[in-house]
Amino acid sequence: MSTPTFRTHQGTETDERDRTENAAAERTDEHADETESQRQLTCPECGGQLASDTEHGETVCADCGLVVDDDEIDRGPEWRAFDSNERDSKSRVGAPTTNMMHDKGLSTNIGWQDKDAYGNSLSSSQRQKMQRLRTWNERFRTRDSKERNLKQALGEIERMASALGLPDNVRETASVIYRQALEQDMLPGRSIEGMATASLQAAARMEQVPRSIDEIAAVSRVDAEEFKRAYRYINRELKLEIKPADPVQYVPRFASDLDVPDETERLARELLEDAKKQNVHSGKSPVGLAAAALYAAGMLTNLDVTQAEVSEVTDMSEVTIRNRYQELLEAQEATSPVFGGEAAEA
């Protein structure tokens, strides 16, 4: 049986005194902190309230205008974001994810330069080691046949888009379309190059920067008939519901290649708009209509442009340009008889 211990009255008084001193010290520290905080928030000249001017990086007095501190460090980002997607894409935590890479850019990549972090060349044994690491890294990045298929297709889309001068949003859309086709097992029995070309053609039309079949066939590794079949298949199975290409969408690019003035380009757009009102564009090649509109606009603005020059830029025959040229003038005459008479005389 343990013997109970008893605290003396003197020990109790000592503990009480220690607690009182500690509480007093804490209150003194808190008071000192509050005093320092108030000193930092008040103007040393007039005692007014201080305000932070983030635009100029200064701390100024709201009453007397005294600049208390300047050249402050802005710890925020140097960019602005208006939604969550834009904020994520500009975040400084690594490269943004993209559908243009088979792994969406989440894997690592070993550079091809045989140099260390200081720019010094690697030795022979180190170069061999790095080459083995690159080989194994590429093998680990593609784990199954679907990833290998996707990697090859996205590389093909990137190659053709670069050759056609298509922007990044078209490449991103084409990558999404091909991913959807791959997920729905639409690839068996069809070539990767044909489906990739069809995806790029669909994306270009969806983003309103279409390319003609001849232009796409020139950079594709399959013939036009194969990727046209693949395009119809993708459009039907994925229910893309892509509208026919508008001839007006071809005018800016052709006008830039022909180096025609803005007046001629604007008149070509007006000719096409009048033709659409008369339903002349139905069942006809939009590229041919755009070429004829530029030729007609050049004639009406006294521009020295020939059918051969327009044919070379647009890859349309001179016969097609002449036929569509007459149809555009007839549509313009029906819409505006006065202007149509002047056009016929020209």
Image: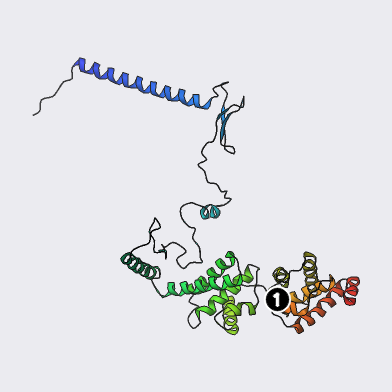
- Mark 1 is surrounded, within 10 Å at the Cα level, by few (under 14), some (14 to 19) or many (20 or more) other residues, namely some
Which residue is painted at 75% across and 80% down in the image?
Answer: 308
Under circle 1, the secondary element is helix
Horizontal and vertical percent position of residue 80: 57, 48
Q: Quadrant of residue 265?
A: bottom right
Query: Residue 304, relative to residue 41: is it above or below?
Result: below
Q: How is the image coloured?
A: rainbow
Q: Is residue 18 left or right of residue 47?
A: left
Query: Residue 73, relative to residue 102: is it above or below?
Result: above
Q: How many marks?
A: 1
Name the residue tied to disc 1: 313
Q: Is residue 190 left or right of residue 228?
A: left
Q: Is residue 134 left or right of residue 342?
A: left
Residue 329 can be seen in this image: yes
For the N terminus, which image quadrant? top left
For the C terminus, which image quadrant? bottom right
Amino acid on which disc 1 is placed: Val
Horizontal and vertical percent position of residue 273: 78, 70
Which residue is painted at 43% across and 25% down in the image?
Answer: 33
Q: For this rendering, which residue is in front, 120 or 1?
A: 120
Residue 239 can be seen in this image: no
Which residue is painted at 57% across and 76% down in the image?
Answer: 198
Which residue is painted at 91% across and 71% down in the image?
Answer: 338
